[in-house]
Image (spheres, helix red, strand yellow):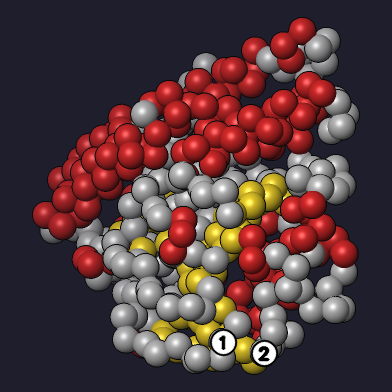
Amino acid sequence: MSRVYNFSAGPSMLPEPVLKKAAEEMLDYKGSGMSVMEMSHRSKVYMSIHENAEALLRKLMNIPDNYSVLFLQGGASQQFAMVPMNLMKNKKIDFIHTGQWTKKAIDEAKVVATVNIVASSEDKNFSYIPEDYQFSPDADYVHICLNNTIEGTVYAQIPDTGSIPLVVDMSSNIMSQEIDVTKFGLIFAGAQKNLGPAGVTVVIIRNDLIGKHSEDTPVIFRYGTHDKEKSLYNTPPCYSIYVAGLVFEWIDQLGGVKAIEAMNREKANLLYDFVDESKLFSSPVDKRYRSLMNIPFVSPSDDLDKKFIAEAEKEGLITLAGHRSVGGMRASIYNAMPLEGVKKLVDFMKKFEMENK
Ligand SMILES: Cc1ncc(COP(=O)(O)O)c(C=O)c1O
């Protein structure tokens, strides 16, 4: 068996111990005589998986009791639509526009509300996070994307929105570093980068924001529906929740989010330090806002980029092409990417640079 180092932006690598445990438990989960994929979501055995995943998520992220945790479907993209439907009063939403994922969220919000872009980094190709903004006093909420997966930027500081709820798309950096949940009214994230397989979307919502949906919101799209039924209103993505639970156990055993953050910083520094000293590769991102998770870099030409990506693949360093809209390279180094993977990438970059001076 030969496993590659997969630098995909998502779905992405899962921790090897998690995959092994899932494989061991595949045919007969803890004496139940069946796999988690086959059991009723109302069964006792599944309920304990479901409750365990929520308890560990709460523990790892230090989620206070006045927040609900929901396991939903439809991806982070569905949240772009659900958040405005559920949090609307004045039908006014403030956005800080930092890239392609806020663009999609803006387009979705515009279907039902008036969108006010209070700041944007589009002037410099989204290579930084704007810090100069004023929020509308009557905004229903402010939407930000904390870590911009495609552009490789992250907020250096969480905006202070006062009494206006702050909604955050944390899809590409949830559980990668310590954050204070109480700074946010609502956090959402698709699982397929840091938490587990695709199929489950985590929503962490402050309880006072539940039940504020507009009248025409379908029942299935109301946070209140899922909160009341503990994410079992309808069949949840059971297997994805189970694997996410295994990922949470893995993080817990490593020492929690604090320990993972230290590892993530070490990995990212290794790569950034080399890119900064390299004469061939460079980073398009303002140093103050560099992501720990998604690291774009470029060589001087498209042809050299293509050569790099093709040769890296032969070394088992795969999915290093930048997003189709920006080109170049991008290494996504989520929680499950081992330090050895980043070391191997940096060694390969050094060798490539020597050979292509
Ligand atoms: C920051 C961010 N938001 C939203 C999405 C969309 O997620 P999904 O495909 O789960 O709808 C992604 C996917 O890559 C993302 O990186």
> Element type at marker 1?
loop
Taking depth in this image into account, of 171 and 6 the one nearest to the observer is 171
> Element type at marker 2?
loop
- Taking 299 as reference, is 64 left or right? right
Is 163 above or below relative to 171? below
Q: Tell me where residue 95 appears, x and y as whole percent.
A: 51, 82
Query: Earlier along the polypeptide chain: callout 2 or callout 1?
Result: 2
Q: Residue 207: name its quadrant.
A: bottom right
Is 181 above or below relative to 90? above
Q: Report the number of discs.
A: 2
Identified at 68% across, 33% down, the residue is 51
Q: Quick check: can you spot residue 12?
A: no
Mark 2 neighbour class, 10 Å CA radius: few under 14, some 14 to 19, many 20 or more: few
Identified at 72% across, 26% down, the residue is 48
Q: Tell me where residue 110 appears, x and y as whole percent.
A: 67, 86
In the rendered structure, find residue 90 and report the number of the disc placed on it.
Answer: 2
Query: Three-letter amino acid code at disc 1?
Result: Ala
Q: Quick check: can you spot residue 259?
A: yes
Q: Tell me where residue 334 appears, x and y as whole percent.
A: 43, 44
Q: Tell me where residue 179 appears, x and y as whole percent.
A: 39, 53
Query: Three-letter amino acid code at disc 2?
Result: Asn
Answer yes or no: do the residues labelled 2 and 1 have beta carbons within 8 Å?
yes
Name the residue beneath numbered marker 1.
139
- Taking 60 as reference, is 114 left or right? right
